[in-house]
Amino acid sequence: ATVKSVEFVQACASLAGCPKPTLPEIAVIGRSNVGKSSLVNMLTNRKSIAKTSKNPGKTQTINHYKMITGAGSYYLVDLPGYGFANAPEALREKWAEFTREYLLKRETLITVMLLIDSTVKPQRLDLECLDWLGAAGIPVTIVFTKVDKRKKIAAGKRANPQETMEEFCREAMDNWDWDELPPMIYTSSETAEGKREVLNHIASLRQF
Ligand code: GTP
Ligand code: MG
């Protein structure tokens, strides 16, 4: 699963504007500020191939990164986040619209990595997003972010987001036509924890 090289291909704001669907792709989705772009940097060994910010709403386009690995090539796709309260409504709707169209219609999409902040209880929007992906029949991998921060919170006070996600999945699975719970992986873009696990998981999908 070693990444041999990575290349930023392009940014676009519509499905039609995406690169030709010649490679399988893995998209990264989640709340604004959850660490999507940071995860892309961590997975690609590049400090800032994807632009990150402490302010939510940094990524506003569909960004394709071409990953060349020993096992084949694929696109890793960074997306705008949801739940960015400060964006003007018109903008928010536009992002949601092209992101939704991309997720529903991109024929080469093999899984969506849904990022969940491991330091807090999953939010209503996270569960709504998961429900939407499940109902749409889009395969999901749950990736918990910022575990380095989680370790600084006293054990008794830590939220258990995995429990919430599993419980929610178990209740909804019949509606979604899933046979098993989605894979769940813990990561930190600060310490690179979980990096190998995510890359190995992607490689295990073996559709490239
Ligand atoms: P949008 O593009 O706005 O949707 O956000 P995003 O999900 O791409 O988040 P981004 O990667 O820009 O990171 C948001 C903030 O969280 C930045 O200040 C990052 O440094 C921080 N961050 C991301 N991942 C981690 C992590 O694993 N640990 C810690 N401690 N901070 C992180
Ligand atoms: Mg981003």
Image: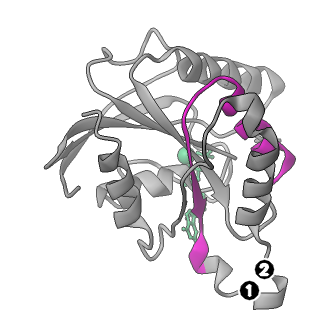
Seen in the image, is 60 located left or right of residue 87?
A: left
* Numbered disc in front, either 1 or 2: 2
- Rendered image: mark on residue 153: 1
Query: Is 131 colored magenta in this rendering?
Result: yes
Secondary structure under the numbered disc 2 in the rendered image: loop
Is the shortest distance between ligand 1 and the CB of mark 1 under 8 Å?
Answer: no
Relative to residue 73, is residue 46 depicted above or below?
below
- Residue 86 in sight here: no
- Residue 96 visible to an observer of this rendering: yes
Where does residue 103 sit, x and y in percent of width and height?
A: 56, 24
- Residue tagged by mark 2? 158
Q: Quadrant of residue 3?
A: bottom left
Q: Is residue 138 above or below residue 94?
A: below
Q: Residue at x 71, y 39 (%)?
A: 130
Q: Name the kind of residue labelled 2 in the image.
A: Arg
Magenta range: 123-148
**Residue 19 image position (x, y, % from top left):** 33, 18
Please provide percent x and percent y for residue 193. Answer: 44, 73
Labelled pair 1, 2 in contact (Cβ < 8 Å): yes
Instruction: Identify the element where label 1 is drawn.
Output: loop
Q: Quadrant of the C terminus?
A: top left
What colour scheme has been applied to the protein in the rendered image?
A: one colour
